[in-house]
Image (tube, rainbow, N blue to C red):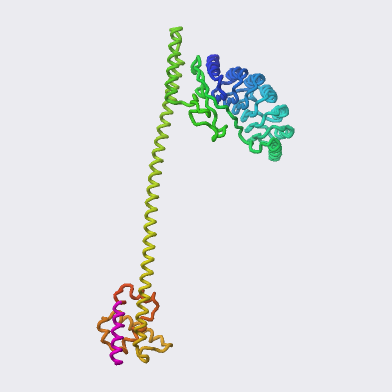
């Protein structure tokens, strides 16, 4: 209605210094499109305009086409989720003609606008034939069909500037899509722009945009119409400035903050007082509505910041706990490795002592044993081995002191068989009674002394 158009016009006049205007799903309709067209026609700074989801029909498209004929700065125009095909083909024809003759427009998004058949494709093809600037065209989810796809392909083949054309959900034949992709690749290679396929990325010059209060409130305008933020998905994220600042380092008015909210409250209150001073009967409901909008936006921001701070604290606790456990586990692993090294040293020392004792026992037995009594045949029957094992167990379990007075002929062969065992077997047999090793050494020495005495 007229009130909504008046408010929108006031809002647009406050954006004259902006390089980007996003009015997604603001429900401005064809009347709002006319206000935007008036704003666009004489604007030399705006480079991106997004009017997605605003119910714009063929009439609104004609308004915008007229503005494009007078504008020479716009680079990106997004009209997706509208109804440009509603009301006849005059709006699409006028828009395509204006885009084809525009000197700066590189990106046009007409996705989900009901563009149907070969007739719509012919108008789009004529636009491609006339334009040597347009590089990105978005036509997804329009029922263009197989015949329309072939018409569009014929014009894409003749075009040398288009880098990317999205036809998802357009019911275009697979072969047509492949041929179109080949033609687009040819254009990219020919222009040295092999990496510019895909969503268009507009480069905005960094500059702080001064804030201006509109002379009317947003009582008739959808809240999203007041959005001045740029859709981050349409830009290279790693090149965006930090939130709240422009790339030049100046504070930006595009982000809600407590300081900015207080400033806007003061401006609105001053504006309200000025209006009441002019006419005490004038309604200031729009000012109160704007104040309520600011308060709700600030409350949402505070809540989001609190949630983000809580999340950061939680993640900090988790990280600290993980680091602490990792350090503790590394210390335990290092201690276990040190214990393993110590056990290995002890094992080697014990093995060396066993080898030394075994050598001593062998020397004592060989030096003093009686050849006939101490040595057994090389090929012993299995039964004798079994008996010898039993005798050895008896030696291990018996009192070594009493064995020292036993006949040399009976104890010597057992002792000799015992000390000739492999070191590992010797250690295994004496593992639970290490004192037997020293006892056997003393027994060997005693038997050696007895042999010397008997020989004398």
Q: Is residue 439 magenta?
A: yes
The quadrant holding residue 137 is top right
Q: Position of residue 448 (x, y in %)?
A: 31, 86
Q: Is residue 295 left or right of residue 400?
A: right
Q: Nearer the viewer, residue 406 or 178?
A: 406
In the image, is residue 346 above or below residue 290? below
Q: Is residue 217 something one can see in this rendering?
A: yes
Q: Is residue 46 left or right of residue 382?
A: right
In the image, is residue 199 above or below residue 286? below
Q: Position of residue 104 (x, y in %)?
A: 66, 25
Q: Which residues are magenta?
A: 438-456
Count of numbered circles in the view? 0
Please name the residue shown 43% across and 15% down the image.
269
The quadrant holding residue 118 is top right
Q: Position of residue 385 (x, y in %)?
A: 38, 84
Q: Of helix, strand and loop, which mostly describes the magenta segment?
A: helix
Quadrant position of the C terminus in the picture:
bottom left
In the image, is residue 179 above or below residue 103? below
Q: Is residue 280 magenta?
A: no
Q: Is residue 173 something one can see in this rendering?
A: no
Q: Nearer the viewer, residue 323 or 216?
A: 323
Quadrant position of the N terminus in the picture:
top right
Outermost residue toward the front in this view: 456
Q: Position of residue 50 (x, y in %)?
A: 58, 26
Please name the residue shown 38% across and 87% down the image.
384
Please name the residue shown 28% across and 88% down the image.
450
Q: Nearer the viewer, residue 444 or 296?
A: 444
């Amino acid at each position: 209605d007229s009130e909504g158009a008046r408010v929108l016009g006031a809002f647009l006049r406050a954006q004259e210094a902006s390089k980007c205007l996003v009015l997604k799903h603001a429900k401005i309709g064809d009347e709002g499109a006319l206000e935007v067209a008036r704003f666009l026609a004489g604007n030399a700074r705006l480079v991106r305009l997004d009017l997605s989801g605003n119910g714009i029909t063929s009439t609104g498209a004609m308004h915008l086409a007229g503005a494009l004929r007078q504008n020479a700065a716009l680079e990106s125009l997004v009209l997706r989720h509208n109804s440009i095909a509603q009301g006849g083909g005059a709006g699409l024809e006028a828009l395509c003609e204006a885009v084809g003759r525009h000197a700066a427009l590189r990106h046009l998004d007409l996705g989900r606008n009901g563009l149907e058949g070969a007739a719509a494709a012919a108008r789009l093809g004529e636009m491609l034939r006339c334009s040597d600037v347009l590089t990105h065209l978005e036509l997804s989810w329009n029922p263009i069909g197989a015949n329309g796809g072939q018409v569009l392909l014929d014009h894409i083949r003749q075009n040398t500037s288009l880098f990317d054309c999205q036809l998802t959900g357009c019911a275009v034949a697979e072969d047509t899509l492949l041929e179109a992709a080949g033609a687009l690749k040819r254009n990219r290679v020919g222009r040295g722009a092999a990496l510019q396929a895909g969503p268009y990325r507009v480069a905005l010059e960094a500059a702080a945009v001064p804030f201006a209060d509109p002379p009317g409130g947003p009582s008739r305008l959808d809240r999203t119409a007041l959005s001045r933020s740029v859709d981050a998905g349409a830009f290279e994220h790693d090149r965006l400035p930090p939130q709240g600042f422009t790339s030049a380092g100046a504070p930006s008015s595009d982000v809600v903050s407590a300081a900015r909210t207080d400033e806007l409250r003061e401006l609105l209150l001053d504006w309200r007082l000025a209006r009441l001073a002019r006419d005490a009967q004038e309604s200031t409901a729009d000012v109160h509505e704007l104040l309520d909008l600011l308060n709700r936006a600030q409350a949402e921001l505070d809540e989001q910041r609190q949630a983000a701070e809580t999340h950061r604290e939680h993640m900090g606790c988790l990280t600290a706990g993980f680091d602490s456990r990792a350090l503790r586990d590394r210390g335990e692993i290092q201690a276990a490795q040190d214990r393993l090294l110590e056990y290995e040293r002890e094992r080697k020392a014990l093995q060396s002592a066993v080898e030394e004792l075994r050598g001593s026992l062998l020397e004592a037995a060989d030096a003093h044993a009686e050849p006939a009594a101490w040595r057994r045949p090389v090929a012993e029957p299995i039964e004798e081995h079994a008996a010898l094992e039993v005798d050895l167990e008896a030696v291990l379990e018996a009192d070594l002191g009493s064995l020292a007075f036993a006949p040399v002929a009976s104890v010597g062969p057992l002792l000799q068989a015992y000390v000739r065992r492999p070191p590992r077997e010797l250690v295994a047999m004496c593992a639970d009674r290490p004192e037997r090793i020293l006892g056997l050494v003393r027994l060997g020495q005693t038997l050696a002394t007895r042999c010397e005495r008997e020989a004398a």
